[in-house]
Amino acid sequence: MVTRGHARLLVAPGLLLVAGVFLAPFLLLVAMSFWSQPEGTLLIDPTPTLENYRRIFSDDYYLRGLGRTLWLSLATVVISLVLGFPVAFWIVRRAGRFRRLVTALVLLPMVCGALLPTLGLVNILSPLGLINGTLKALGLIDRSIPLLGTQAGILIGLVQAFLPLMVLPLVAVLDRLPPSFEEAAMSLGARPSQVWRRVVFPLSAPGVLAGSTLVFCAALTSFVTPQILGQGKIATFAAMTWQQASLVLDWPFAAALAMVMLGLIAVLGGLLVALRRRAGGRA
């Protein structure tokens, strides 16, 4: 018989691993964000200060980077939802025996990692790539449309990379939604658009919230895709953090930038909990 003491011993290795790999570095990051690094040196002053945060929220460069990153993240969520909801619905209702194959194809960009699909998009979005080449061959454009080094190119890459994070939660929720609900609504005279708007979409709200949260957090902290598709011309918050840590070697300021991103994710998590409670109260 396993006693409570034995259970604690079994859990102890996992807790130690979490504490050593996640908790301790996180606490160090929090503390370092309040430290400072005098200009012209690599020495760190552990005296607590709010200078790093004051610098972030008083400098237009970082505020514009934060606003740009939030805009790209929110746009990625909206486009992923618009594209992912019909895909998830089709997988649940129409894919049939091809469901596993289609699901595997949806997951393929994530299995390949961020670098390989992004490099593929470079060839597609480049001035001599597939999109511009096709449009020129059809006589629709005379000059190449600039896609690389623009926010539009980054947005395309983010949607392509994180669309699975929207589709999979929606599939999980829609799979538990009986088709009889839709049939009952249509038998009462509801048009297909009304069934989607007043039955399917409201009942799939948990999947929408979960997918939107995952996509937003992933897009907010994404680094590889914006750097490659942005060609170094579009500064996102994650790129600014990397520059301060790896190029400038100002670790306290980089820690403060990272904490701002984590703070945004925490705020989003709080809003998600509030929305879930509100939805539960209405139910």
Image: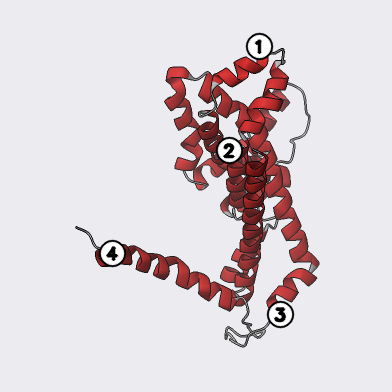
Is residue 150 in view from this perspective? Answer: no
**x, y percentage for residue 153?**
68, 42
Q: Which numbered disc, 4 or 3, marks the residue that appears first in the sequence?
A: 4
Is residue 74 in view from this perspective? Answer: yes
> Which corner quadrant holds the C terminus?
top right
Query: 236 or 23: which is nearer to us?
Result: 23
Type of the residue with mark 1:
Ser
Find disc 1 in the rendering and name its residue. Answer: 187
Closest to the camera, between mark 2 and mark 1, is 1
**x, y percentage for residue 218?**
58, 50
Crowding near the residue tagged with mark 2, few <14, some 14–19, many ≥20 C-alpha atoms within 10 Å: many
Q: Which numbered disc, 1 or 3, marks the residue that appears first in the sequence?
A: 3
Q: Residue at x 74, y 50 (%)?
A: 71
Q: Residue at x 45, y 66 (%)?
A: 22
Spatial CA distance of label 2 from label 3 is 40 Å
**x, y percentage for residue 120?**
55, 39
Residue 90 is left or right of residue 4, and the answer is right
Give the secondary structure at mark 3: helix
Q: Which mark is residue 51?
A: 3
> Which corner quadrant holds the N terminus?
bottom left
Spatial CA distance of label 4 from label 2 is 37 Å
Q: Is residue 265 above or below residue 139?
A: below
Find disc 2 in the rendering and name its residue. Answer: 207
Q: Which mark is residue 4?
A: 4
Q: Is residue 103 above or below residue 16?
A: above
